[in-house]
């Protein structure tokens, strides 16, 4: 459908308005020579006008040489015939630049040997009958059963399927929580997850900085504290047991909710997976999980287990807004969980990360200081900001993208690089590490 709008308050005839707008689309390049135009009957129906209005516009444009009719094939924008067509700009050719290889903290490694299970899940979906209306606002019931079982088995969370809400990823889960929390500030680790900061700011709330390596002792001004206790993003530390207990006690005393982002805890290989914070105080902690690190970021699927006192309001908010992941995505992920695909991918990815981590340390440790344990799919390195900037630019010039630690900081005075090793191939990783090592050694 063409982007056309007719204004009945405009004194000009509707046919003239229509001809003017199509003419401007051609001049702007939105319509190019050779593009097919709708029939006058369809155009009139789309715009809600008499067919004679569309016929008048097409007759005018045809007389001016902007369009032409072809017997049996419709109406087309004129290509090269007449003086008017010669002035029509052509669309620029698409660029073919080689994309950068991402050495970032969020791109996972996926074992292609399990691709058959992935294809099987989507084939199964193609023969399924979609629901006739909006489904359970918490998400597909069968998927929530499998998620509850997996959370109990892998994260120590004793939850009922009715407690689980399927989301369109971590930030969507956070957004749903914010919709049912008081409009007070939210405390977030600093340095911390940039998408969480932006999600909170977009609600009009202030963001309070929690120094990432210090215990949380004051939440009086906040309605919630957003933390990554199993693998602090991006410094990599596991929150010590005493800091966990202090955080929970502070939240209980000050009436705040703890939001636990458990984004990659399954990929620990330096220690056993750390139990979820929500397993200690389910009445205080809202738990967020994601499929982005195990299956694919582009799947846009996650889950939320909220404290019991927030669940009725959360369910009602979801019922009204219909803000749930697409049914095909939920159905496919259910099949991936049921058939063991997710467990198999996590196991193989954990082995791959455990093998790659020492290579990253060997390449970069002569030139920078580790900010914390290397776990999951990335490591963070401390070094002066000017050297970090130079290394990032040298990497980009060579075809690799890395992230500055400073980009994750708000009030924290830290600088360095966040180097991911999940997304590239082994050859790409070794090449990228060689580029960074040469730059940091210079």
Image (cartoon, rainbow, N blue to C red):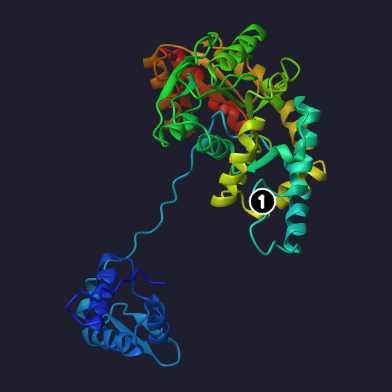
Looking at the image, residue 11 lies above or below residue 3: below
**Quarter of the image where one finds residue 152:** top right
Residue at 73% over, 20% down: 275
What residue occupies the far left of the structure in this picture? 11
Residue, disc 1: 329
Dot 1 falls on a residue whose secondary structure is: helix
Expressed as whole percent of the image width and height from the top left, the position of residue 265 reads 68, 25
In the displayed structure image, the side of residue 217 where residue 306 appears, left or right: right
**Residue 288 shows up from this direction:** no
Expressed as whole percent of the image width and height from the top left, the position of residue 357 reads 65, 20
Residue at 27% over, 65% down: 28
Figure quadrant of the C terminus: top left
Residue at 70% over, 62% down: 130
Count the labels in the image. 1
In the displayed structure image, the side of residue 410 where residue 212 appears, left or right: right
Q: Callout 1: 10 Å neighbours few (<14), some, many (20+)?
A: some
């Amino acid at each position: 459908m063409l982007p056309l709008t007719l204004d009945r308050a405009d004194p000009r005839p509707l046919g003239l308005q229509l001809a003017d707008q199509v003419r401007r689309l051609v001049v702007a390049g939105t319509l190019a020579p050779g593009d097919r135009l709708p029939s006058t009957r369809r155009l009139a129906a789309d715009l809600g006008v008499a067919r004679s209005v569309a016929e008048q516009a097409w007759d005018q444009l045809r007389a001016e040489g902007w369009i032409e009719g072809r017997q049996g094939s419709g109406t087309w924008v004129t290509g090269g015939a007449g003086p008017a067509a010669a002035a029509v700009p052509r669309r620029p050719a698409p660029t073919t630049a080689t994309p950068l290889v991402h050495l970032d903290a969020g791109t996972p490694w996926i074992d292609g040997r399990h691709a058959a299970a992935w294809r099987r899940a989507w084939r199964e979906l193609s023969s399924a009958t979609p629901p006739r209306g909006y489904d359970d606002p918490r998400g597909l019931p069968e998927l929530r059963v499998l998620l509850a079982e997996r959370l109990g088995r892998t994260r120590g969370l004793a939850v009922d399927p009715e407690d689980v809400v399927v989301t369109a990823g971590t930030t969507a889960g956070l957004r749903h929580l914010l919709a049912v929390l008081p409009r007070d500030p939210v405390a977030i680790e600093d340095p911390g997850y940039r998408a969480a900061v932006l999600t909170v700011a977009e609600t009009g709330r202030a963001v309070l900085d929690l120094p990432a390596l210090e215990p949380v002792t004051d939440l009086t001004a906040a309605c919630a504290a957003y933390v990554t206790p199993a693998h602090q993003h991006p410094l990599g530390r596991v929150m010590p047991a005493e800091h966990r207990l202090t955080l929970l006690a502070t939240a209980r005393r000050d009436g705040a909710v703890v939001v636990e982002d458990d984004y990659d805890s399954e990929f620990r290989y330096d220690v056993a997976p750390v139990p979820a914070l929500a397993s200690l105080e389910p009445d205080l902690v809202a738990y967020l999980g994601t499929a982005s690190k195990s299956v694919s970021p582009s799947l846009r699927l996650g889950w939320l287990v909220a404290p019991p006192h927030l669940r009725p309001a959360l369910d009602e908010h979801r019922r009204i807004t219909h803000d749930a992941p697409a049914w095909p995505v939920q159905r496919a992920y259910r099949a991936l969980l049921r058939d063991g695909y997710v467990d198999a991918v996590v196991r193989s990815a954990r082995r791959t990360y455990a093998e790659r981590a020492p290579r990253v340390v060997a390449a970069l440790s002569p030139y920078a200081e580790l900010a914390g344990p290397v776990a999951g799919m990335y490591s963070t390195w401390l070094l002066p900001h000017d050297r970090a900037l130079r290394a990032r630019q040298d990497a980009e010039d060579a075809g690799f993208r890395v992230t500055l630690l400073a980009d994750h900081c708000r009030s924290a005075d830290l600088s360095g690089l966040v180097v991911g090793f999940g997304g590239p191939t082994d050859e790409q990783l070794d090449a990228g590490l060689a580029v960074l090592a040469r730059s940091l050694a210079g």
